[in-house]
Amino acid sequence: MKSITDTYRLSNGKTIPCVGFGTWQTPNETAVESVKNAIKCGYRHIDTASQYGNEKSVAQGIKESGINRKDLFITTKLWNDDRGYDSTLKAFDKSMKELNLDYLDLYLMHWPAVGKDGDKINHETWKAFEKLYKEGRIKSIGISNFLVHHIQPLIDKAEVKPMVNQLEFHPGYTQPEIVQFCHKNDIVVEAWSPLGSGSVLKNPKLTEIAKKYNKSTAQLCIRWCLQNKTLPLPKSVTPERIIANTQVFDFNISDEDMKMITQLPKMGFSGLYPDEN
Ligand code: A2P
């Protein structure tokens, strides 16, 4: 990857810009400005979710950016309360209205349904995703926070395989089993909280390695995601950080440092376990 507009190729042949702008925990008051600003700084991939409560403001930011819709890649997600065939179709329409879009680039099931009927509910929900995909209303479909034991049953019955799995992934929380499974199955892994929601940035080892490359710890984390072939979704409402988080294409982390970062002990975990949602 050489720039923020370089892309990963999804299993259906579509492309997705290799860094996305995250909006989790971005309130409406700051979402318009930060999305507009991010697009001005070169981001072309915006990630939101109905659960974030900011789809309308994200849409406003996109509108005010003046960038052509077709030059943007927009993701939103189906919330847990809306699982099931009919409710998914309804929730999708609502998100599209909030986002003021007539097609979506990527729709994700936000969390797997778990427990006795979990696989059945995921399958019914997925059927609605497949319908919307086949109708062309969504260009690519995927899941989020699915572990191997959630994804395998879904794939076994699916007509269309998920193209993306969005997971918590940052130094100190690397989920190797599911990441390897996705890579083996041609599913692009997106990294949510690539900075551990900011909590890993003061880690002395990361700070020391970042210094060596003349980069900030945040830039090191984002670059580390890319070199792990994952797609980072850094979130910021701060203009200088929004720009800084794009400046990750002029250095290369050595194999040795990559290994050292990957082997850091558990830190920055959100505490959100897919089996408890
Ligand atoms: P803010 O939005 O106030 O700028 P993650 O992407 O892992 O969810 O992390 C987001 C958190 O990290 C936010 O609190 C954000 O703060 C902070 N953050 C984002 N980019 C940087 C950066 N370059 N340097 C320091 N903190 C950052």
Image: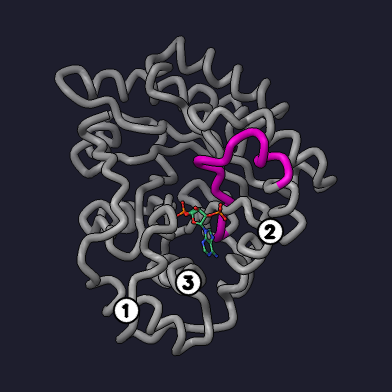
Q: Is residue 234 left or right of residue 150?
A: right
- Residue 179 visible here: yes
Residue 205 — which label? Answer: 1
- Residue 15 visible here: no
- Tell me the quadrant of the picture where the N terminus can be found: bottom right
Q: Residue at x 41, y 71 (%)?
A: 224
Q: Work out whether mark 1 precedes mark 3 in sequence or the reverse, and give the earlier one.
A: 1
- Tell me the quadrant of the picture where the C terminus can be found: top left
Query: Depth-wise, is mark 3 or mark 2 nearer the camera?
Result: 2
- Residues shaded magenta: 18-33
Specify few, some or many for label 1: CA neighbours under 10 Å numbering under 14, 14-19, or 20 or more: some
Q: Position of residue 85 (x, y in %)?
A: 41, 14
Q: Is residue 83 left or right of residue 219?
A: left
The colour scheme is one colour
Specify few, some or many for label 3: CA neighbours under 10 Å numbering under 14, 14-19, or 20 or more: many
The answer for how far apart the CA atoms under marks 3 and 2 are is: 19 Å
Residue 239 — which label? Answer: 2
Q: Residue at x 51, y 40 (%)?
A: 25
In the rendered image, the residue lying farthest to the top is 86
In the rendered image, the residue lying farthest to the right is 66
The answer for how far apart the CA atoms under marks 1 and 3 are is: 16 Å
Question: Is disc 3's CB within 8 Å of ligand 1?
Answer: no
Assess whether residue 175 is covered by the magenta stretch.
no
Residue type pointed to by label 1: Lys
Up-down relation of residue 59 to residue 5 (above or below): above
Assess whether residue 32 is covered by the magenta stretch.
yes
| Front one among 60 and 231 | 60
